Image: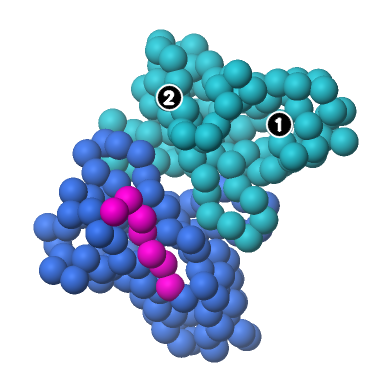
Amino acid sequence: QQQVKQSPQSLIVQKGGISIINCAYENTAFDYFPWYQQFPGKGPALLIAIRPDVSEKKEGRFTISFNKSAKQFSLHIMDSQPGDSATYFCAASWGTYKYIFGTGTRLKVLA
Amino acid sequence: GAVVSQHPSWVICKSGTSVKIECRSLDFQATTMFWYRQFPKQSLMLMATSNEGSKATYEQGVEKDKFLINHASLTLSTLTVTSAHPEDSSFYICSAKLPSYEQYFGPGTRLTVT
């Protein structure tokens, strides 16, 4: 019940395309869902996060879609750029407790 | 804002020695910091939760006598890997938590034990 399942494991997208990464969870107590971007050899950087009281949140080219009934949330990267090539992690948390991370998605955007 | 630093960024040590890694929140106070370990091409594995002024809480399977954590102030937590062995070689990352939900991560420390 503590797991967060992330898919796909890897993703290749053409420049200008839309990258979509999905996560699913079981624990309905989760109430905070962040996405992190990590470049090789660097620490993860917070991209965008959502609470379950909204179904969508957009910041620039990054959008989180949240489906509470399906217990799923996804990250959409619009107009994907080669500079977006990185590993993306979803996570879930409840209260102010620790994060449960997904397994990561390696995104490659072709120029 | 919300910048977290780590020092050193990389370290090489001989087997049997100890190494200390510092994690600092530069522009905010963090009552809670977390220490993670990450193997190549894998997700972040939480090692322990560090609370200022109290003992760290270790995740199941993490040896607390090997990975000593001290959170002496609201801006500094340290991880000491004692009697390091080659299997301890890894990428160690800390994060600091705001009073809300957000966690901000440091740049990581690459430890190589020879």
- The residues tagged by marks 2 and 1 sit, at their Cα atoms, a distance apart of 23 Å
User: In the image, what residue type sits under mark 2?
Assistant: Thr
Task: Name the one closer to the observer, B103 or B80.
Answer: B80
Residue at 29% across / 41% down in the picture?
Answer: B101
Number of marks: 2
Task: Name the one closer to the observer, A41 or B70.
Answer: B70
Classify mark 1: residues with Cα within 10 Å, few (<14), some (14-19) or many (20+).
some
- Give the answer, above or below, for where A36 lies relative to A19: above
Camera-near label (2 vs 1) is 2
Residue numbers of the magenta segment: A1-7
Q: Chain of mark 2?
A: B
Q: For the residue labelled by badge 1, is the local secondary structure a helix, a strand or a loop? A: loop
Quadrant containing the C terminus of chain A in the rendered view:
bottom right
To which residue does mark 1 refer? B8
To which residue does mark 2 refer? B57
User: In the image, what residue type sits under mark 1?
Assistant: Pro
- In the current view of this chain or complex, which residue is farthest to the front? B61
Q: Colour of chain B?
A: cyan
Residue at 63% across / 60% down in the picture?
Answer: B41
Task: Name the one closer to the observer, A53 or B63.
Answer: B63
Residue at 36% across / 59% down in the picture?
Answer: A4
Q: For the residue labelled by badge 2, is the local secondary structure a helix, a strand or a loop? A: strand
Residue at 80% across / 37% down in the picture?
Answer: B86
Residue A97 visible from this viewpoint: yes
Question: Which chain has been coloured blue in this picture?
Answer: A
